[in-house]
Amino acid sequence: MTFVPTQEQLAIVEASTSSSDNLLVSALAGAAKTSTLKLIANANPGVNMLYLAFNKRIVTEMQHDLPRNCAAKTLHSLGLAAWSDSIGTRAKTDFGKMGELFRETIRDLNKDDTAAAWKSMGFILKSVGQGKGAGYVPDSIEGDYKHTRLLDDFMMEQSLPEEPSPLEWGLIRYISAESIVAGHAGQVDFDDMVFLPTVFRAVFPRYALILVDEAQDLSPLNHAMLSKLVKKRIIAVGDQNQAIYGFRGASEAGMSDMQERFDMTELTLSCSFRCPQAVVEHVQWRAPHMTWWDGNPTEGVVATRAVWSLADLPESCAIICRNNAPLFSMAIQLLQFGRYPNLWGNDVAKALIKTMNTLGNPGTDREDALAALRVWHEGQMKRARNKGNLRDRMQCMKVFIENNQTLGEALINAEHVLSSTGKIDLLTGHKSKGHEWADVYFLDQSLIGKEGQEPNLRYVIATRSKAHLTYLTSALCKEREDVGDADWEGEAE
């Protein structure tokens, strides 16, 4: 089929060639933003351009379709090259850097502090990484290097997800400072690749036009990096309705912040080629101007399943939920039913198993393990600033412990479930962004809140569907195969 650009796409391409304005393209879910960026690149043959994205896979794919005058890089690869040029030597990536710094730092602590530090290692190193992503430079070395820091000690401490102990806070500050020193000597990790060249002195290559993908996910640090990079013109594409990564440091109002910073003219891509009519109409509460493509082979279906069975789920579908715990429970049920799930999120799985191992020995019976889990949860709740994520972690572990006689059996079962590779995808809404399925099942929609970026998350989950969007409730899953059409309700609210 021959690709025919829409009138919106043609208007954007025209603006890219006939004006010198910085452009901000608001592209709704499935609205062909990637093909639009390609059209822009190919419409400017004499312009030295750079395409920027977060994901290496996307950059690799784009490299094959972009013209020779348009380079394609991730923010991290661009930053690493700029930092190497700035320090006069090729920076060496060392992904074990922070572990080494941690071990060196605690070497001279007393026995009790050493034990406490090891126990808090995950929190400490995660906090250091978070600080890099937010542009944190410790007060202790504030005058040692020329820089433009975004966070000082006070702001950094207030941003942490948990209130640190004096020992933890001291280690976070010290390791952050030592990491900066090591970075200037050429030893960098993944977080350093954007942090160091943005906050400290670095010279970026010059391009006449910068193309930015997924603009809604940019953090204040990313905006600062672009300010150093953009010398002439920038065109960015994104969807503010899909801004769901505030918890990772992305700006809450990323696109409006970018529009003000770079004085951008806003254009739109409102026609979704992914979502059929029924899904588009269903999400117009969030995106009123969203339309559907007339050439879509299906009008789509949006419905709520009142009572349902695991047998109803087709192969290659996706079950998407706000939280992990209902997905873990669903994965166990699918395996028991003879269906094989594909549970996304190995990072979450590893952290859960590590915590479960601290609740007792393998022979610890179910009741004692649950009691230990309650003690762990109460202790964490006293420190946690984000109570919701902590509750979800606790519920995930509870799912496995309650389904087994001992803690050892729960751990074996957890590893089995988490390593399953079936044809029914189970994932959170945050992990679903950037993906699509013909059949999407929205599990336990009541877990979605109404404040902050929660409405955006609801929109993201719903717009993953290319044909059928079905709302399910965990408690209404029945172990029978004779659930018929009579149990379908009308369109979900």
Image (cartoon, rainbow, N blue to C red):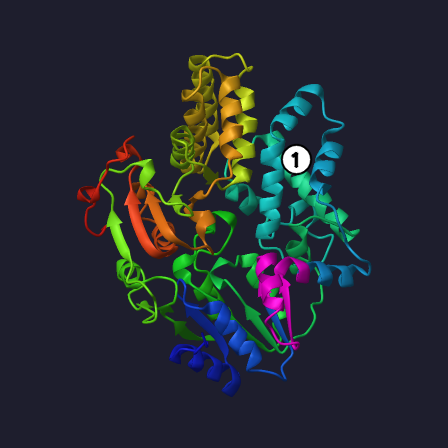
Give x and y (percent) for residue 135.
60, 53
Magenta part of the protein: which range? 52-78
Q: Is residue 53 magenta?
A: yes
| 115 with respect to 326 (left or right) | right
> 297 and 141: which one is in front?
297
The answer to whether residue 415 of the structure is visible from this angle is yes
- Dot 1 corresponds to which residue? 171
> 320 and 248: which one is in front?
320
Q: Residue furthest right?
A: 89
Mark 1 residue crowding within 10 angstroms, few (<14) / some (14–19) / many (20+): many
Label 1's element? helix
Give x and y (percent) for residue 381.
44, 29
Under mark 1, the amino acid is Leu
Give x and y (percent) for residue 104.
76, 33
Q: Does the magenta stretch include residue 446?
A: no
Q: How many labels were placed on the picture?
A: 1
